[in-house]
Amino acid sequence: MKKPSTTPQTTPPHIGTLNEGSLHASLKQYISQPGDSFEVPINGFVIDIVRERNSKKTTLIEIQTKSFLAMRKKLASLLDEYLVHIVYPVAKETLLIKPDKKPRKSPKKYSVISIFEELVSIPELISHQNLSFEVISVSLRKTQEYDSSLRRGRGGYRTVNTELTEIHSTHLFEGIDDFLQLLPKELPSVFTTADIANLGNISRQSAQQIAYCFRKAGAFEELSHTKEGKHYKITN
């Protein structure tokens, strides 16, 4: 088994650190266990958490608050040799803090289904035996400042810090079968994305993202394409 090349940092960050990486740092502390190593360089990449257990492969834990696309090269380099566990937070609620304004809740709310917005960047990998995901439902506080240079000089607010305030639940996905459990139980044997959306009470866009990911991962087979849309079945 290949070992990390340098002596790692072994002290996790503190929850509530007010800097640009405070959400990332808070999740790192939440996920970490005794014996973990932090910020370890492997294969030219810096890994958030490295967890070694005597009876298993080394597990590399990456906390990804956005853009799975940015991880493609890293995953391609690491997955054949290591177990990789991606931790992804979704904001159940977000409190927006702006100067000289009363704090307000963002109208945007996300659920575990929101991970498919990112999985569309790596759909072929979600069935990889060495890759797992953990979706954490959280509450956030975003501090924003006015920036006159935004929106082509018309001005706007930019986020300067995202802080974790509460963890509601976690959802573990250790393979494609776990992701398939998110599909509506009443889904017919042959279905469209409209069926997924209506029965799952989600948007058509989310249903299309789900279908795209599952088709690329080999979990859906496309049977036909009619005016109603593409018809799929779940592969065995």
Image (tube, rainbow, N blue to C red):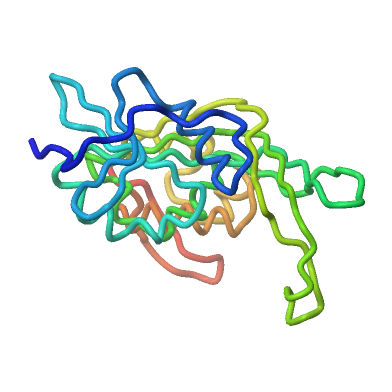
21 vs 57, nearest the viewer:
21
What percent of the width, then of the height, locates residue 213?
A: 40, 55
- Residue closest to the eye, 72 or 188: 72
Q: Please, which residue is most extreme toward the left here?
A: 1
In the displayed image of the protein, which residue is found farthest to the bottom? Answer: 152
Q: Relative to residue 166, is residue 149 depicted above or below?
A: below
**For this view, does 168 lie left or right of residue 44?**
right
Residue 28 location (% of width, % of height)? 45, 33
Badge count: 0
Q: Where is residue 228 drawn, in percent x and y?
A: 56, 65
Would residue 37 be found to the left or right of residue 228 on screen? left
Residue 167 lies, in percent from the top left, at: 60, 27
Where residue 179 sits, quadrant-wise, is: top left
Residue at image coords 54%, 36%: 186
Q: Quadrant of the N terminus?
A: top left
In front here: 175 or 229? 175
- Residue 17's image quarter? top right
Residue shown at the point (58%, 41%) measured from the top left: 90
Apparent side of residue 17 relative to residue 13 in the rendered image (left or right): right
Q: Quadrant of the C terminus?
A: top left
- Is any part of residue 218 visible from this angle? no
